[in-house]
Amino acid sequence: QVQLQESGPGLVRPSETLSLTCTVSGASISSYYWTWVRQPAGKGLEWIGRVYSGGATDYNPSLKNRLTMSIDTSKNQFSLKLSSVTAADTAVYYCARGSTTWGFVYWGQGTLVTVSS
Amino acid sequence: DIQMTQSPSSLSASVGDRVTITCRASQGIRNYLAWYQQKPGQVPKLLIYTASTLQSGVPSRFSGSGSGTDFTLTISSLQPEDVATYYCQKCDSAPLTFGGGTKVEIK
């Protein structure tokens, strides 16, 4: 069974960098693409970006200037870094496995990141 | 970038009612559309992919249709456990935009 687990600080100071890691078990990270989605409290889902096993990335245009995603196939992990955060970046962050055909079948449980001083 | 517009943003229906949610893409996306269900406090769950293919384990009262720019999600007979917010998402190319969501409640 494919499982994903987000990890990282739950509190980030304004203007600093939000860093999250997603650890994948039950499947090789060398297939499909791997993606991040966030959801502010009481609001809808926002696609953040994706990374392929070879390292290629696609980002949400609204975030691309602050966003870096990477993948470590040796650890079966992929990561997200979002710089210069503000309160507007406070959200539950989900990692997921993606496919053009199937969408996002497998999701992590989500991790709440709060941006506050 | 292609925008995804869902309607209505919320609806209230009785148990047993037929419910239809619409998703419109600002440009054609062929059939690369997924539907998700998110119950309160839970992780989104894939219901339908490629516009009309039911994900394994999803009840047959859910169905999807459409191609190009116009898509629908139908619940043939609404059940209490279907109370949730439903999202469409384009899956063809980045950005993989979600619709704004449709909140379904029981009347």
Image (cartoon, coloured by chain):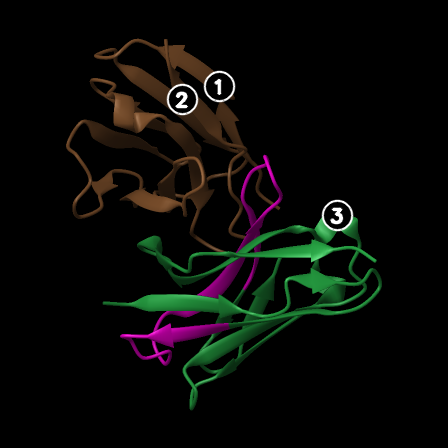
Chain colours: A green, B brown
Same chain? Circles 3 and 2: no
Mark 3 element type: helix
Q: Residue at x 52, y 21 (%)?
A: B9
> Helix, strand, or loop for circle 1?
strand
| Residue B90 point in image, percent of width and height | 45, 45
Cα distance between the residues tagged 3 and 2: 27 Å
Crowd class of label 3 (few under 14; some 14 to 19; many from 20; radius 10 Å): few
Q: Is residue A43 magenta?
A: yes
Of residue A7 and residue B84, the one placed in the foreground of this image is A7
Span highlighted in magenta in the image: A22-49
Q: Is residue B37 left or right of residue B56?
A: right
Q: Quadrant of the C terminus of chain B?
A: top left
Q: Is residue B8 visible?
A: no
Q: Which residue is mark 2?
A: B104
Q: Which residue is mark 3?
A: A88
Give percent across and percent down for residue B13: 35, 10
Judge from the rendering whether residue A25 lies leftward or rightward of residue A111; answer left or right.
left
Q: Residue furthest bottom?
A: A74
In the image, B49 versus B101, the foreground residue is: B101
Q: Height in image: A60 above or below B28? A: below
According to the picture, the residue beneath numbered tag 1 turns out to be: B10
